[in-house]
Image (cartoon, rainbow, N blue to C red):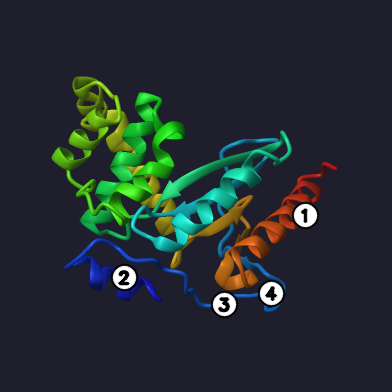
Amino acid sequence: MQRRDVLKQLSAAVAVGLIGRPVLAQSGSGFELVSPPQPTEAKGKVEVIEFFHYGCPHCRAFDPLLEQWVKKVPADVYFHRVPVTWGNPQLAGFARLHLTLAATGDLARLHGQVFDAIQTDKQPLHTEAGAQEWAVKKGIDSKKFLDAYRSFGVQVGLQRVEKLGRDYKVQGVPTLAIDGKYFTSASIAGSHEASLKVADQLIVRARGEQGRK
């Protein structure tokens, strides 16, 4: 499914998954090239970004596999998640919730439960009121949550993730970006499991390109 189809559906309902993307290069290799390559945050490390959104069932299916993979990556790998928004208010609301949970220190505990709340329970977590009500039920102080949700830091973070999505030209999720140079995903590599194996290979490749072994 293409990005444009997801955004059409979001006008009437919560987002559905998105896995399709045009193949740019390296056909059959399980990865594509990021064009142009993007700067990374952690010098001396290999950066891995997961682009995702909470309304995507493919992201939800991928998440447990990714969680296990992240626990085993080498110490020189810097992994983080970037929620896509594509200019859509619902996806922006999901992204704001993600950033708010990171700011309150509750993201690791509640990340997986956000998928369930949105996709199974159909809770309106893209809205401030819906997100706050859910967060309070999960044990977060109401004022603490709302202060973070409305904070300048979260607003800046939202602008940053929106820019990353644009700069990387992300068209499908879940997608992994390795060291600002390579993409892999289930739609490119053939399966979620295969994409993680390709990511392992690309980490080794990127490390070598950095002049490290």
Mark 3 — residue? 23
Which residue occupies 33% across, 66% down?
A: 16
* Image spot of residue 29 (x, y percent): 72, 72
Q: Is 179 or 90 nearer to us in this picture?
A: 90
Q: Is 4 or 114 nearer to us in this picture?
A: 114
Decide which of tag 1 and tag 4 comes sooner along the chain. Answer: 4
Decide which of tag 2 and tag 4 comes sooner along the chain. Answer: 2
* Image spot of residue 28 (x, y percent): 70, 78
Helix, strand or loop status at disc 4? loop
Mark 2 — residue? 6
Which residue occupies 24% across, 31% down?
A: 137
Tell me, for residue 205, which label it has, or none.
1
Q: Which quadrant is the C terminus positioned in? A: top right
Asked whether, in this view, residue 136 is left or right of residue 201, the answer is: left
Mark 3: give few (<14), some (14-19) or many (20+) Cα within 10 Å.
few
Tell me, for residue 26, which label it has, or none.
4
Tell me the CA gap for discs 2 and 4.
Answer: 26 Å
Which residue occupies 65% across, 67% down?
A: 31
Mark 2: give few (<14), some (14-19) or many (20+) Cα within 10 Å.
some
- What's under tag 2, amino acid-wise? Val
Decide which of tag 1 and tag 3 comes sooner along the chain. Answer: 3
| Residue furthest out toward the front | 121
Tell me the CA gap for discs 2 and 3.
Answer: 19 Å
